[in-house]
Amino acid sequence: MTMRVLRKGSLKTAAMFGAGMIALAASGGAGMAAVSCGANTGQAATGAPVKVGGIFGNAAPGDFSASTTAARAYFDCVNANGGLNGRPIQYLTENDQWNPELAAQAASKLLKDEKVVAMVGNGSFVEMAVNAPTYKAEGVMTMASACAVSECFESPNIVSTNQGPLPSTVGAAQYMVEEKGSKNVSCIGLAIPDVGPWSCGAMEGYMASKGLAGSSVLLNPASPDVNSALLEAVGSGADTILVNLPAGLAIAFLKAAEEQGMGDSYQWASSTPLYDRTVPEALGAYWDGKMYVNAEMTPWDKGGPDAVNWLAVMDAYAPKEAARDSFSQSGYLSAKIFVDAMLALDPATLDDRAAVTAAITAIKGVTSDLMCGPYYVGEADRHMPNHAGTMVVVKGGGFETVRDCYEYDSPYFAPIFEQEKALGLR
């Protein structure tokens, strides 16, 4: 399998699974796919645990726990296969319940009471906005996986494998303009200042940069009125409606559009949240071939080493009902990149937060078939390594890829591109 990379290197060849694989029969998973985790020793780690934290949001308006669930699954697999050079990872997670006060308490508990050396797999609308200054003050790096707010991407101590709503929304609009001829796009988002206005605003900026029209309709997350939002989008004169909402709320919005018979009257697109295995069935046949979705991680059917291993790890170490979605892919990948960086350290230094932070900051040029370009960190006031993606369409009860890895076009990315040039990645 080959995969197009949009930054340094024109092609990346995904090596086939082979050496280093461990049969799950050893851990009670006979009959499943093989897994590859960390040092792959096949022996459980028995040394002193290394404490790692994670914060997720699970309450209205959405459940972002897939990221920490996948990170935990990978860490459990690593612990069963040698740990971090003999030391197991003790993964401590907290649910902020989309509550700023609880988010602050969670960070304080993990950083000050438990003294975790890093945060991995975080996913929330709330916690990054509240805790970004705390992460900087505590000198801890957060390798997030389900970021949704501007602070997550505009902070020195947070870096995420997922794109967040801004790149994904811009990418969806770009596809609709370039491939579907959209001239006027209305973005449906949440009226959370560092979420909806930030991401839908960037979409408007993209449209303006092309001499086209863009507008935003922002819903109150506490009491979203999808029917009023739909009418406002129609009233804007849009020819394309771009849904930038958590999956459950996005489905409710599209059901309202279906009830009004609007599926063929407008073009429809969405940011990543609708790229979920359960969505095509939830939407039904009405949206078949109509709903175009941006995927911030590469599609599941690509079948590269990380894509295959992610599912194998989830099957072996995560609950059966756990989501297998983009946030899950991101959580797995953040955990894997973290483990690989820690395996290069002397295990005696893994209790030293400064040493762990330095090792994370030094990460550069990590490639994976789950991302369209290299992952990196570096010392910077913002981090957004993932800003290229794929477009799919709801088709035949699943998703069909309509555009493979492509770089997003927006003035917002200018400082990110300069950072990549400085690191030799562009």
Image (cartoon, helix red, strand yellow):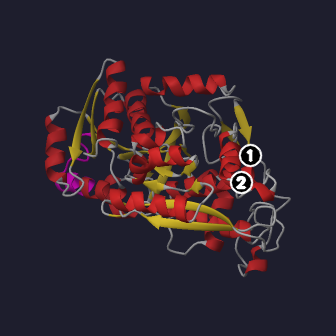
Q: Which residue is mark 2?
A: 305
Label 1 CA crowd tier, 10 Å (few <14, some 14–19, many 20+): some
Tell me if 108 is positioned left or right of 370 in this view. Answer: left
> At 34% across and 25% down in the image, what residue appears?
205
Residue type, numbered disc 1: Ala
> At 62% across and 48% down in the image, what residue appears?
370
Residue 164 visible somewhere in the drawing: yes
> At 31% across and 32% down in the image, what residue appears?
201
Establish if 140 lies above or below 267: below
Confirm or deny contact between disc 2 and disc 1 (CB under 8 A): yes
Residue 260 lies in the magenta-colored region: yes
In front of the other: 42 or 54: 54
Q: What's the CA distance linking mark 2 and mark 1?
A: 7 Å
Establish if 289 lies above or below 40: above
**x and y, in percent, of residue 306 in the image:** 68, 54
**Bounds of the magenta segment:** 254-266
In front of the other: 276 or 133: 133
**x and y, in percent, of residue 361 in the image:** 65, 40
Q: Which residue is mark 1?
A: 14
Residue 17 visible somewhere in the drawing: no
Label 1: element kind: loop
Residue type, numbered disc 2: Pro
